[in-house]
Image: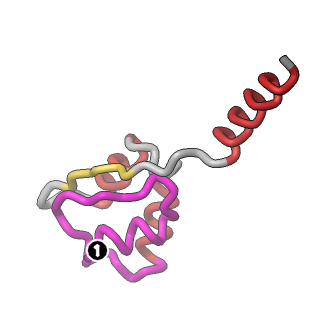
Amino acid sequence: DESDDADQQTDETNETDEPEIKQVSINILYGATGNSIAQLLIDNGLIQTKEEFYDAVAAAGADTRLQAGNFKIPSNATPAEIIAIITN
């Protein structure tokens, strides 16, 4: 019995320590505004606030390079990494 309990505990710990990284698919429509892209990223759990998005866009100088299209973004991507993905 004791060994079963130990195994269970280990499994639970692993799940909490390393959340599964998923690929989140987003579709940015042609002509989408920065505001709507930020909201899309929030809705998909990739960022917490629009400010995070705007700060990352400004830091990358990417305000004119946001692309329309389908993108796969890792669920653990930083705002800077997200900008790099959606400006390619």
Looking at the image, the residue that sits furthest to the left is 30
Measuring 37% from the left and 54% from the top, which residue is drawn there? 38
Find numbered disc 1 in the image and state the secondary structure of the residue it sits on: loop
Quarter of the figure with the N terminus: top right
Q: Is residue 52 magenta?
A: no
Residue 31, picture quadrant: bottom left
x, y percent for residue 37: 31, 55
Q: Which residues are magenta?
A: 59-88
* Extreme residue in the top direction: 1
Q: Nearer the viewer, residue 9 or 60?
A: 9
Q: Is residue 36 above or below residue 65?
A: above
Residue matched to label 1: 87
Q: In the displayed structure, does residue 10 sit left or right of residue 49? A: right
Q: Looking at the picture, does residue 72 appear above or below residue 12?
A: below
Report if residue 81 lies within the magenta region.
Answer: yes
Tag 1: residue type? Thr
Question: What quarter of the picture does the C terminus occupy?
Answer: bottom left
